[in-house]
Image (cartoon, grey):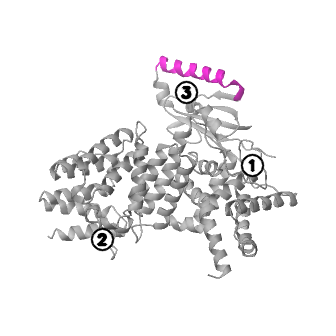
Amino acid sequence: MSQYLVLIYDDEAAWSAADESVTGQIHSGHTVFAEKNGAALAGGNALQPTTTATSVRPDGDGGFQITDGPFVETKEALGGYYLIEAADLDEAIDIAKQIPVVAGGLEVRPILTFE
Amino acid sequence: MSISAAVAAAVADAHRREWGFVLAATVRFTRDIDLAEECVQDAYARALVAWADGGVPAKPGAWLTTTARRRALDVMRRDELFRRAMPELVMDDVVIDSDEPDEIADDRLRLIFTCCHPALGMEAQIALTLRLLCGLSTAEVARAFLVSEATMAARITRAKKKIAAARIPYRVPALAELPVRTGAVLEVIHLLFTTGHTAPVGADLVRADLVERALQLARMLRGLLPESSDVAGLLALLLLTDARRETRVSPDGALTLLADQDRSRWDRARIGEGAALVREALRLRPPSRYALQGAIAAVHAEAPTWGDTDWSEIVALYGVLITVWPSPVVALNRAVAVGFADGPGAGLAALDALSAEPQLAGYGYLPAARADFLHRLGRDDEARLAYEEALHLTDNEVERAFLAARLAALGT
């Protein structure tokens, strides 16, 4: 088995504009997803929106530059993740397809293991 | 022919016919694509000597597979320190007898589904397929796509690394996934064919090497998936389209339109085989995209003369095609067929309905088709502008020469 990080990218504007019936559906979608794939789930979290993000970048001079906002500005921002276990990429994609999204998509990244 | 020349020819023939079979069977054994490639290369080199001494074996593919697998076993055993550069390929556990490659479970299907996995970029899928299934060298693949060998080597290495690191499995997809995944394989073969059929850039209209490789792959897939009507449809389309290859360019290198081609020189064997496959592929409902495209090609191929073309049948087939495969290019082809079925005025109206289609904005065939209908309606000033627009949009020299000649024929 291998581990994959499934990154959930969604449109924050669409998410904040969505009414309760939509957000409720997404929340219950995650509950259903977690129940169905419990055996494969090694972790996961939802993140606060990018307006709460702080970027920390070494300035090359021993100090740090601290700035407001996410490291990379994108229309669809990282909003949460699951850490899953799967036999291969096909299985990982099958699991990822079940994660609910509003107006974005998912990125499946294999975890690098050091021997 | 001397013995050594006969043996060299037999090895070259086995390289063309059996490379994919031998490599696929060896990959299943090594679980490492790079090691398998090295060992298969080595087996072909050994064949030159061994076949000169002992004669060409009855089953060259089996001989080469056994030799490559033994070599792999040697490498893995002798070199205790043998360390894979990449993780082992993921595959279902199958018992492997290293001496007797089993001929029933054909590994080429596993290999092609791995090469054409949707998690790989389309260019990488094509490059891997040519390299691993057809046995082209990196330099040959690079030449086929007009990029430097270093660029192609990097592209292939990156794709192999992704297969290993992301664990793209070496496996035939489950039945539920099979139609979609087969579609991805067919797309690769079709793109390879169209790239060869009308080279996007360069001095030659047809790149015969790419066309032949696409046909070879389609035939291979047809043998491996005989129940798939999509596969039958694609092979039919390629055969029927390629049957006209010799007549698409005149002896002096000029583009010859379907209307002006010498039909007596069309390849009747390919047309017969393609038409039979179309009938088989159309039996399944709803008919696949390729089966319908093949059916359209068959209507053209079976018309004795341009004047005998059954245009209303072609318009009807395009009408069905656009429902199973909605695409602006299909709409454009349908509009052109309308022009032949119902006259240039109707054709022009159908074309102009597509003028706002963003996907056709840079597509040279739209103004070229408009120019032809405008000319036939006697509106030569507008036709001239349309030909000039089409000329701006193509980089194939044979197509450019054709359009320039049409433009010149309008006079000033």
- Which residue occupies 30% across, 70% down? B401
Using the image as rendered, state which of residue A81 and residue B255 is in the foreground.
Answer: B255
* Amino acid type shown at disc 2: Ala
**Mark 1–mark 2 CB contact (< 8 Å):** no
Residue hosting label 2: B401
Q: Quadrant of the N terminus of chain A?
A: top right
In the rendered image, residue B276, in percent from the top left (x then y), is placed at: 41, 50
Tell me the tag on residue B362. Answer: none
The stretch in magenta equals A19-40
Using the image as rendered, state which of residue B326 and residue B231 is in the foreground.
Answer: B231
Q: Could you tell me which secondary element the residue under label 2 belongs to?
A: helix
Q: Say which chain tag 1 marks.
A: B
Query: Separation of disc 1 and disc 3 at Cα?
Result: 32 Å
Residue hosting label 3: A100
Residue hosting label 1: B88
Local crowd size for mark 1, using a 10 Å CA cut-off: few (<14), some (14–19), many (≥20): some
